[in-house]
Image (cartoon, helix red, strand yellow):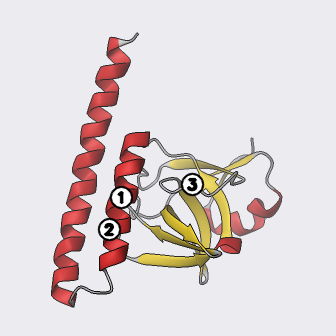
Amino acid sequence: MRRSTKTADVYQALPGFEPSVRFQLTGRSMEPCLLLGQTVECRTPRSLTPGNCYLFRFGDRMLIHRLVKAKNGTAFFMGDNSGSIEPVSCGDIVAEIEDRASQLYKLITVIINRLFLMTADFLPFFLRGFFLRIRLKGLKIIFAITSYFIKIRNNYFR
């Protein structure tokens, strides 16, 4: 393990990181799974799995968002608390992020994000904003419900 790193230093640290790097988050686009100020650990991506979080280059910034789908060398990402869709070349994906979301949450998130991705181009602007707000509220509710049931399951099987 290496020491905690600031987001700006990630560009220098990641190309040769072994086996992982930690740094502190500076944004809110992945709430409620990844919180502002939380320290996350990144590792070399093993494979691109929809629902997992990845660190990638997007223009001159580094972002962490959840993978919606990868097709023909392009990966599509969305933040859990963000409405933007980021199409990225698979070569710009730098690392996989460890997040605390359950597999059920990841699966439901992928389904909701794919539906939003399919319909986003066809919706008028005012309806797109409406569906985006519903998506954001729905993801927060789903995270709370799945987290609650995981706590119950963990307490029951101790």
Picture layout, residue 89 above or below residue 100: below
Nearer the N terminus, badge 1 or badge 3? Answer: 3
Residue at position x 46%, y 41% from top? 100
Which label was assigned to residue 115? 2
Residue at position x 33%, y 21% from top? 153
Q: Quadrant of the C terminus?
A: top left
Q: Secondary structure at mark 2?
A: helix
Q: Are marks 1 and 2 in contact (CB under 8 Å)?
A: yes
Residue at position x 40%, y 49% from top? 107
Residue that mark 1 sits on = 111
- Image position of 11 (left or right of 105): right
Q: Residue furthest bottom?
A: 124
Picture layout, residue 20 above or below residue 53: above
Report the amino acid beneath label 2. Leu
Which label was assigned to residue 49? 3
Q: Quadrant of residue 146?
A: top left
Q: Are marks 3 and 2 in contact (CB under 8 Å)?
A: no
Q: How far is the residue under mark 1 from the one under mark 3?
A: 13 Å
Report the amino acid beneath label 3. Thr
